[in-house]
């Protein structure tokens, strides 16, 4: 683990390009990393939900982190998600990647079994102790069944067990409560939201930035939208909000499958058309977009200015 270098802006939860036989596609992953950085993103979150981590083997996840760290070459911070179904499994993943050069380690609550808040405290404390570094809380209750409460995050931050949070819960009141708790207790916590639509208002809602999956497709729009929000010129903000709304229509191309499949498969299909990745393969049971689902995708990318 590296020394804390500061985190801000748009951190992209990077997709994991796969070959048709299901292995990590190194060449495509390298191209995608460069595409993101060249278009102004402020960091990369690897092996996250958008990266289909829960469908990948430990070795594939570790390999994806190695590739990302190598090609990033210290240009932006990289945070690796080490979450597994149980505490000790997550620790094992963390031990396997802690010396790769990551700038942060992210951890969800354990998944499958619902977890109490006191069990969460033990989960994060044990992992931080065994890994010898503070962690990022990855709060995503819609996939892990458990919400990390603002009080729990504060308690962990006060003991320096955690240094940051990615809040993908969509619970605005909890976000506001955490901000107030940290202010009152004079705790510095990197606070990011997993939101596609609050990028231009991150300053106003008291967070350091956003970690939006859709930024895999349109990194320039999101990085510039974040900067526009900091400057605060209303007409410029409205312009980028319109671009964000347009870009999120990518999710309308998939006509079947789960919401995650629709989003990830649509972005992969688009990035393949753009020549960023070679294949649009998905991890099972997710499926790539069908030929019929891809109808109109090229025209949409032209509208976004991503293709001619």
Image (tube, rainbow, N blue to C red):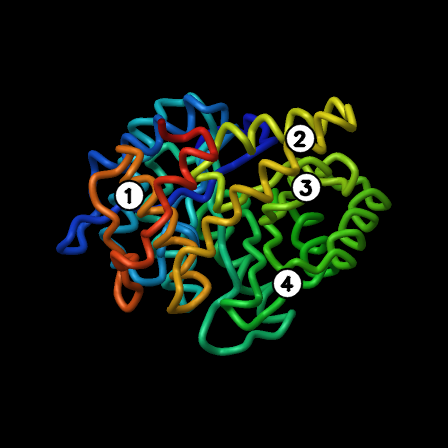
Real-space Cα separation, disc 3 to disc 2, in angstroms: 31 Å
Of the residues tagged 3 and 2, which is closer to the observer?
A: 2
On screen, 242 above or below 223? below
Residue 225's spot in the image, x, y percent?
Answer: 62, 30
Real-space Cα separation, disc 2 to disc 1, in angstroms: 35 Å
Q: Earlier in the sequence, mark 2 or mark 4?
A: 4
User: From the viewer's perspective, is 209 left or right of 124?
Assistant: right
- Residue tagged 2: 239
Are the residues tagged 3 and 4 within 8 Å (C-beta)? no
Q: Which mark is residue 189?
A: 3
Q: Residue at x 46, y 49 (%)?
A: 250
Q: Residue at x 71, y 55 (%)?
A: 155
Residue 119's spot in the image, x, y percent?
Answer: 58, 71
Q: Which mark is residue 148?
A: 4
Real-space Cα separation, disc 3 to disc 4, in angstroms: 15 Å
Q: Residue at x 41, y 37 (%)?
A: 301
Q: Earlier in the sequence, mark 3 or mark 1?
A: 1
Q: Earlier in the sequence, mark 4 or mark 1?
A: 1
On screen, 40 above or below 167? above
């Amino acid at each position: 683990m590296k020394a804390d270098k500061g985190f801000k802006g748009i951190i992209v939860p990077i997709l994991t390009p796969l070959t048709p036989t299901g292995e990590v596609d190194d060449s495509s992953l390298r191209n995608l990393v460069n595409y993101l950085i060249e278009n102004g993103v402020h960091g990369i979150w690897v092996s996250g939900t958008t990266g289909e981590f829960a469908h990948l083997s430990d070795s594939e996840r570790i390999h994806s982190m190695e590739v990302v760290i190598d090609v990033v070459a210290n240009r932006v911070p990289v945070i690796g998600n080490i979450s597994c179904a149980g505490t000790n499994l997550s620790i094992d993943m963390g031990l396997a990647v802690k010396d790769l050069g990551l700038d942060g380690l992210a951890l969800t609550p354990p998944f499958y079994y619902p977890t109490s808040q006191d069990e969460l405290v033990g989960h994060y404390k044990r992992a931080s102790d065994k890994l010898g570094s503070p962690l990022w809380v990855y709060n995503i209750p819609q996939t892990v069944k458990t919400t990390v409460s603002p009080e729990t995050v504060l308690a962990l931050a006060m003991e320096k067990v955690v240094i940051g949070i990615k809040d993908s819960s969509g619970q605005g009141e909890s976000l506001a409560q955490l901000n107030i708790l940290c202010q009152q207790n004079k705790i510095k916590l990197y606070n990011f939201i997993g939101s596609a639509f609050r990028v231009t208002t991150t300053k106003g809602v008291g967070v350091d930035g956003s970690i939006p999956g859709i930024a895999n497709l349109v990194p320039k729009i999101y990085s510039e939208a974040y900067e526009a929000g900091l400057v605060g010129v209303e007409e410029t903000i409205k312009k980028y909000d319109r671009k964000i709304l347009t870009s999120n229509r990518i999710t309308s191309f998939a006509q079947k499958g789960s919401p995650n499949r629709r989003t990830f498969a649509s972005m992969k299909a688009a990035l393949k058309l753009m020549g960023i990745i070679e294949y649009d393969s998905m991890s099972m049971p997710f499926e790539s977009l069908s030929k019929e689902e891809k109808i109109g995708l090229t025209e949409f990318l032209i509208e976004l200015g991503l293709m001619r």
